[in-house]
Image: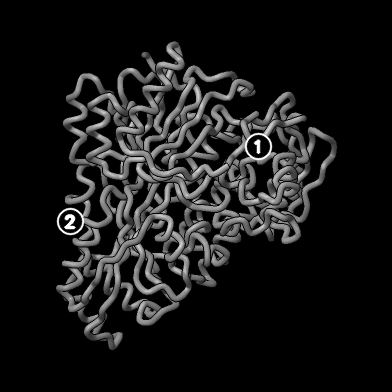
Amino acid sequence: MNIYKKALSATALALLLGGMASAQASAKTLIYCSEAAPDNFDAATTTSGATYDASARNVSNGLIKIKRGSTELEPGLAERWEISEDGKEYTFFLRKGVKFQTTSYFTPTREFNADDVIFSFDRQGNKENPFYGKGTWPQYGAYSFPTLIKEIQKIDDYTVKFVLNRPEATMIASLSLTFAVIQSKEYADQLVAEGKTDQLSQLPVGTGPYQYVDYQANSAVRFQANPDYWGGKQKIDNLIFAITPDASVRYQKLKAGECHIIAYPNPADIDEMKADTSLEVQRKEGLNIAFMAYNTVVAPFDDVRVRKALNMAINKQAIIDAVFGSTGMVAVNAMPPGVWGYNKDVKDDAYDIEASRKLLEEAGVKDLSMKIWAMPVQRPYMPNARRAAESMQADLAKVGVKAEIVSYDWSEYLKRSLEKDRDGAVMLGWTGGMADPDNFLAALLGCEAVGSSNRANWCNADFEKLIQAAKLTTDQAERTKLYEQAQVIFKEQAPWLTIAHQVMEQPVSKKVKDFRIDPFGGYLFEDVDIEE
């Protein structure tokens, strides 16, 4: 089956939706206008939020869930768990009666069990597994699982034990992340027998509230309610992701009733949305950060003086005013102030043109030409990367730095930005998957994340010692001290230009009931309803 069909025009999409409505007169359909196409449908292979939404967040489940609209952890496919006194053994007692989805391409013959849990982690770390290497495993490397997990033992069909090489304070929270959702071993075995291992990331099977139907490339992804979902069949029968990269077009579709929810509105449109009586605009502080990562292993960006000089040349408040408006605040540290352990005493690099020039001169840098990579899509942390890059470009010109703005297709952007010899400073960001400093400092700046989510290629021994020590204790006060020290080193060494944190403002049609903003930036539709 070829799921990557020719992209639908707007008219074709309208006909598709109309056909669904007429075929199911009493069915409820919710249309979400997303900002980008998914890379694929396997969340363990990417750092793309669009992929997470189209796979892990709505189609699958992990052992641990995050309570909808909050940062609170709750049981998922594991009903409960026990932790040994030394913090090295985690025993999970699995939920019984959970069924994997029956689709046109897979019919399960058994229910979810321990074999599926073991497979889902084994495929990521075991080179002998036929699914090893099906992707870049960026999150997996960032969370040190290959060196953390000694073995996973099957105690019985509904009990598994994770044996660790060392204590890990973030273990339970890490299992709520998108890379850790559970895949069907039976489905994987079928694909091996058929010689179709690539299909695991193209035609997903999960245990979640919605199941995949089809994908029209760069146009729409269609899902339907999972009739066997262990959490109860959803009130929405048909869920459609209408891929709409332009924020202005998304807004027009929302006003026209062609979408019920849209991703990442333009901040400039928020006041008008609030005045529209057919819409509700929800607001929540986001656990996010936008940054520009220098390639610290390529000259002259391997010199901290150059990085500091560029940071001081850029007027971040001007970027906030032009790009974020009332939804943004200047970022100082490598994590948002809403995460515990945030160091309030760290001072930002001052906007100082003369000091910037002097530092560049001290570093022996003249007539510097560089590239600024601007993302082609909106994210929860960045409404308009091109406009932000243009502001940076103008500022850098004032200190004699010529900046060229470049961009690529989103999938290509993410892929190329991983290259060790990358030319240029890449604009990216992060929305935390859990409300823990480790999810920012280790995931984005740790040595083990180089080559994955550490786009600065920065590996600092003093910083690494602190964040690793913080993983070994569950004493939050002690962890806070360690993370505060790590943030001081980060700011001194300046592997990034920290740009902004964005407050999330989410327009929703008033027909939609009980949609909740995800503080981690996802779009989750479990238990959401709609009035037809």
Q: Amino acid at mark 1?
A: Leu
| Figure quadrant of the C terminus | top left
39 or 435, which lies in front? 39
Residue 28 visible? The answer is yes
Residue at the image position 27 percent from the left and 44 percent from the top: 246
Considering the image in quadrants, where does the N terminus appear? top right
Q: Secondary structure at mark 2?
A: helix
Res 278 label:
none
Q: Nearer the viewer, residue 201 or 58?
A: 201
Observer-side mark, 1 or 2, equals: 1
Query: Would you name the residue on which mark 2 appears?
Result: 318
Q: At which x and y percent is residue 38?
A: 45, 46
- Percent x, y for residue 213? 53, 32
Q: Position of residue 78 (x, y in %)?
A: 69, 33
Residue bearing the label numbered 1: 63
The structure residue drawn at horizontal position 28% and vertical position 28%, both measured from the top left corner, is 281
The amino acid type of the residue labelled 2 equals Ala
Q: Secondary structure at mark 1?
A: loop
Q: Which sits earlier in the primary sequence, circle 1 or circle 2?
A: 1
Picture residue at 55% right of the left edge, 67% below the top = 447
Classify 333 as above or below 218.
Answer: below
Q: Position of residue 299 (x, y in %)?
A: 38, 82
